[in-house]
Amino acid sequence: MEWPMEHQGLGVVLVAPQIPQNTGNIARICAATFSELHLVKPLGFSLEDAALRRAGLDYWKEVRLFLWEGWDHFTAANPHKRLLFFETGTYPPYFTASFAPGDMLVFGRETKGLSQRILSFSPHSIYSIPILNGKVRSLNLANCVSIVLYEALRQILLGKNS
């Protein structure tokens, strides 16, 4: 299936990511889906990190990468973008969100998630990925981005009820 380009403009936003391999894998996912990757500092690694580069393979040239000095810089530069936040907890499941072209999918750092300050930015736009086994606290960040990004693409490209 060849995907039309009208979904271009979906963005994946990583706030203070810490693990270079996760970010590299997410970069590869963004390249594969024509999605932007926004990295919000502070980063827990250098953009020259070998593990980051290796996880993204040779697809870095296909990534539309934006680097922001902090959350306030990101939001000031994207005032009209709709932000959807993804966090662990008892929030509505991600598949209840209605995704649209231009949405920014916001994920927090691997160990702490998103701060209350950021979550208060739009408290009615916070979603979670259900974890069925109560003994499991969280999922890998790259897996979470994959799950949510492909649901967003499914809704945009095939229609929400497909």
Image (cartoon, rainbow, N blue to C red):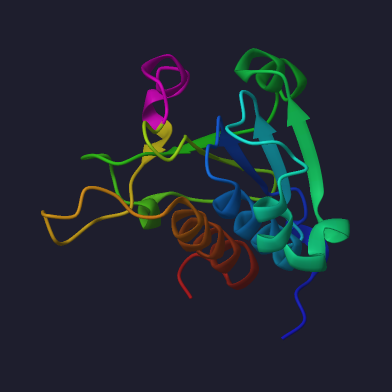
Q: Nearer the viewer, residue 71 or 7?
A: 71
Is-magenta flag for residue 116?
yes
- Dividing the picture into quadrants, the one containing residue 2 is bottom right
Residue at the limit of the structure toward the left, as seen here: 134
Left or right placement of residue 124 versus residue 51 in this view: left
Residue 11 on image: x %, y %? 67, 45
Q: Residue at x 76, y 31 (%)?
A: 67
Image: 93 above or below 86? below
Image: 136 above or below 32? above
Image: 76 above or below 81? above
Q: The N terminus is located in which quarter?
A: bottom right
Residue at the limit of the structure toward the right, as seen here: 61
Residue 45 on image: x %, y %? 63, 36
Left or right placement of residue 74 versus residue 86 in this view: right
Is-magenta flag for residue 33?
no
Image: 1 above or below 109? below
Q: Which residue is drawn at 44% across and 55% down?
A: 144
Q: Residue at x 78, y 60 (%)?
A: 6
Q: Nearer the viewer, residue 44 or 89?
A: 44
Q: Nearer the viewer, residue 3 or 140?
A: 140
Q: Nearer the viewer, residue 9 or 47?
A: 47
User: What residue span does the magenta drawing correspond to?
Assistant: 114-124
Residue 89 on image: x %, y %? 24, 39
